[in-house]
Structure formats: C-alpha cells, structure tokens
C-alpha cells in the first residue's frame, strides 16, 4: 500500500507541476453557454455552474493542496525541530516556557485557532506597503492567499514537532555517545547538530509525512468556509463548496474533488505508515 500510495502521490505531484501545460483549459476560463455540461470528449469531467472545465480545475487545485501541505510541513520542521532540540538539550527555563506555551495552545481547538490566524493574516497582509515584510504581501497576492494559509497552519503545527523533537532529545541526551562527545571537548552546537539531530531525524520525518494530510484537509476546510484561497484560484475545498449548492442535481461537482482529496490523503497516510515501519528500529509494530 505504501508503494501504491507513493505512485499515486507521484502522479498527483506531476499533475500539479504540469497543470499550466497539461490542463485542457485555464482554471478561470468560462463558457456561460456550456454550464453544467456532462462529461464529453471536450470536457472529460464536465463543466461547473460557470462553464469552467472541472478536470482543469482539479489539476490546478492539486497545485494548491500539495503546495499547502508540503510548504507547511517544511516550515513546521524549520520552526519546530530547532526549538524542540534546544529545549530538550538544555532544559531549564526555556524548556518550561515551551511546554507551557504548548499546553495553552493545545487547550484551544485547532481549527478555531487556525481560523483566527488566517483571518488576521488575510486582513493584515494587504495593508503592508513598505518595510521588510512587503514580499509577504506580494507572495500572498501572487499565490491567491496560499501564503496566509501556510503561515496560519505553521504557527499552530510547529508545536507538535517541537514536542516530539524535545521528547526524543530527552531520551538521548544522557546516552553514552553524547557523553563521549562531550568528554572529547565537543561544544553544544556540535553535539546537537552532529550527534542528536541525525538520531531524531527518522521519527521527525515520519511525523512530517503524517502531518501533511492534516494540513491539506485543514486547507480544504478553510476553503470550504470561504477563508481559503481567493477566487478564481481553485482548490479542492473550494470546488466542494461551490458544488454543494447543486449537489442534488449535479453530484459529480462534489464527488470529483472529494475523490481527489480522499485518494491523496489515503496515499499520504499509506506512505507515512510505510516509512514508520521502515524506520522503526524496533521492527514492525
């Protein structure tokens, strides 16, 4: 299942990357004389309420979903791993403060906190006219709001990674290879980067793989609520929201993006489980 999931993810990734070239139509091309058309040789998945090609929008929607998942996971690792590594290694006040921040954030429902951050970034970023953060406004505009979604998800998601990294370091910092490195005069930075980080990489990689589906479905939920990417940029969540109004007459408008989303999420979970089995030093679970 892991190999099959990886193959499907490769197809989705290639589709997302090549969408501007391989899609039959642009995602925003409308034909008001061809609304709600059934699948034909011209429109393999039919058209929606504005006469836009559903297959093309699915292909472009894969770009948004995969970009949000991968970019958020990368940002979460970049934030969470150094903080968790430092907190677990040094302990003390920093470690105590980190754990209290984690406790406070986990007391707030995940989706509620993401919605609050997303609303703030959506309102704040367009107001930036000068200064060092102007590039964020430009990037958010060019990506149709994807940057704001990634930032909102990352600011909540990095705490999970930091907690796992801290726990792994706590179990390793008194091991013989760490004590040997210190006795030979290795500085703390060298011990953390050369000895501890490679030993916690496997569980962190597995966790990142399993976090990506959560980020993708969170983006779909935000888009479904109207807080995700800005029209006419498509995402699978936006397509599901648009198809809800006509689900009784044209269920394919919801089924098509729903199947694409479900297949991608299942594939990511299969790959994550396969990595966990492969990298688990204790053998199969």
Image (cartoon, rainbow, N blue to C red):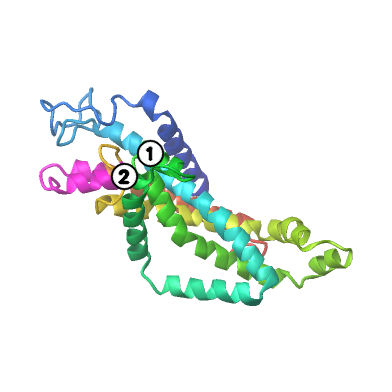
For image coordinates 31% across by 42% down, the residue present is 235
**Quadrant position of residue 15:** top left
Residue 257 spot, x, y in % from top left: 28, 43
CA neighbours of label 1 inside 10 A, class few (<14), some (14 to 19), many (20+)? some
Quarter of the figure that contains the C terminus:
bottom right
Relative to 53, is 117 above or below?
Answer: below
Asked which quadrant contains residue 182, the reply is: bottom right
Q: Is residue 196 left or right of residue 207?
A: right
Is 246 magenta? The answer is yes
Please, which residue is most extreme toward the right here?
A: 184
**Residue at the image position 28 percent from the left and 25 percent from the top:** 25
| Label 2: few (<14), some (14–19) or many (≥20) C-alpha neighbours in 10 Å | many
Residue 135 lies, in percent from the top left, at: 45, 40
Q: Is residue 51 magenta?
A: no
Image spot of residue 85 (x, y percent): 65, 64
Q: Are marks 2 and 1 in contact (CB under 8 Å)?
A: yes
Report the Cα–Cα distance between label 2 and label 1: 8 Å
Tell me the quarter of the picture where residue 188 sits.
bottom right
Left or right position of 24 against 196? left
* Marked residue nearer the N-terminal end (2 or 1): 1
Q: Residue at x 26, y 45 (%)?
A: 238
* Residue at 42% over, 56% down: 153
Query: What are the residue bounds of the magenta stretch?
Result: 235-256
């Amino acid at each position: 299942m892991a190999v099959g999931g990886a193959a499907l993810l490769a197809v989705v990734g290639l589709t997302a990357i090549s969408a501007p070239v391989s899609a039959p139509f642009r995602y925003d091309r409308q034909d008001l004389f061809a609304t709600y058309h059934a699948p034909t040789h011209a429109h393999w998945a039919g058209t929606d309420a504005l006469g836009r090609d559903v297959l093309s929008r699915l292909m472009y929607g894969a770009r948004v979903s995969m970009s949000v998942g991968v970019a958020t996971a990368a940002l979460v690792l970049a934030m969470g791993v150094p903080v968790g590594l430092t907190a677990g290694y040094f302990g003390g006040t920093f470690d105590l403060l980190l754990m209290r921040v984690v406790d406070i954030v986990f007391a707030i429902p995940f989706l509620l906190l993401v919605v609050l951050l997303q609303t703030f970034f959506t309102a704040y970023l367009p107001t930036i006219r000068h200064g060092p953060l102007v590039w964020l406004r430009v990037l958010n505009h060019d990506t149709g709001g994807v940057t704001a979604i990634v930032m909102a998800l990352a600011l909540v998601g990095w705490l999970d990674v930091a907690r796992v990294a801290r726990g792994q370091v706590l179990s390793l910092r008194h091991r013989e290879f760490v004590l040997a490195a210190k006795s030979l005069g290795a500085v703390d930075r060298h011990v953390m980067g050369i000895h501890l980080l490679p030993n916690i990489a496997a569980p962190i990689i597995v966790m990142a793989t399993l976090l990506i589906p959560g980020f993708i479905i969170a983006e779909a939920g935000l888009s479904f609520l109207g807080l995700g990417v800005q029209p006419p940029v498509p995402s699978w969540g936006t397509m599901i929201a648009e198809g809800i109004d006509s689900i009784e007459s044209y269920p394919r408008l919801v089924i098509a993006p729903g199947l694409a989303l479900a297949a991608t999420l299942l594939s990511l979970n299969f790959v994550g489980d396969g990595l966990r089995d492969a990298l688990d030093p204790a053998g199969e679970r």
